[in-house]
Amino acid sequence: MFSILIVEDDLKLAQLLQSYMEKYGYRAEAVHEFDQVLDVFRRIGPDLVLLDVNLPHYDGYYWCRQIRTVSICPILFISARDGKMEQVMALENGADDYIAKPFDYEVVMAKIKSQLRRAYGSYASNKRERTVECTGLVLYPERFELTLSGKTVDLSHKESMLMELLMESSSKVVSRNWLLEKLWDGQQFVDDNTLNVNITRIRKKLSDLGIEEALETVRGTGYKLRPIWREEP
């Protein structure tokens, strides 16, 4: 049974979300001590977090960053702030999706199921771990790790998905529209800034592996991953 942590200071909304999740067979727990969110997270060890932006003591962006220091589980923001900048900030701080209030509970549940499926659906005792390789660069999509020559960087879910798409199309140009469609299932609110943020984060992760200028922007079209690095013998 998947467990979900609800970080929402509107008690009524938190209770409604908890009821819906339990109806769908999830174990859900709501935070009540908003100055100890990370401690609660560590204690519960949830598979997914629903996180509001406006919270007592510290905002949701702060707690998202704190959670990301110890976990790469899916984090979905839920917030009455529906501006583009808020969505960009959520992604920059490590979130996987952003749901604006007011929302349809069925849509929230569908997004939760989608994130859980992507994060954990490939894990099974009778399956070998899947990898994606490109000239010595190895992606572990279910672990959200990227490695090269003994170095490893952690990725978010969206970063892992984006890296997989780029590696599978190595040396080919992939369009922005195609990436948006694949990464966000054609969601209408997602704009170019959302993809830009994730591309920037991918470039930083590649840089951490010692790969510079491998992800090329093709003006007016999209991106191309060029395997300019060399696999060490």
Image (spheres, grey):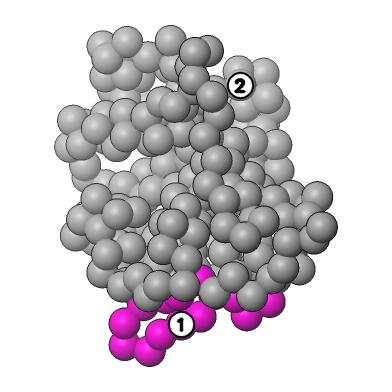
Count numbered badges in the picture: 2
Task: Name which of mark 1 and mark 2 comes first in the sequence.
Answer: 2
User: In the rendered structure, which segment of residues is drawn in magenta?
Assistant: 212-225
Residue lying at 51% horizontally and 80% vertically, measured from the top left: 216
- 228 is higher (above) or lower (below) than 133: below
x%, y% of residue 50? 43, 35
Disc 1 crowd, CA 10 A, few/some/many (<14, 14-19, 20+): some
Labelled disc at residue 208 = none
- Does the image show residue 161? yes
Say which of 23 and 196 sits in front.
Answer: 196
Say which of 3 and 20 sits in front.
Answer: 3
- Does the image show residue 89? no
Closer to viewer: mark 1 or mark 2? 1
Quadrant into which the C terminus falls? bottom right
Asked whether, in this view, residue 180 is left or right of residue 46, the answer is left
- 19 is higher (above) or lower (below) than 109: above
Labelled disc at residue 217 = 1
x%, y% of residue 56? 55, 42
- Disc 1 marks a residue whose amino acid type is Thr
Disc 2 crowd, CA 10 A, few/some/many (<14, 14-19, 20+): some
CA separation in Å, label 1 and label 2: 38 Å
- Disc 2 marks a residue whose amino acid type is Gly
Secondary structure under the numbered disc 1 in the rendered image: strand
Residue occupied by mark 2: 45
Say which of 135 and 186 sits in front.
Answer: 135
Secondary structure under the numbered disc 2 in the rendered image: loop
Say which of 224 and 83 sits in front.
Answer: 224
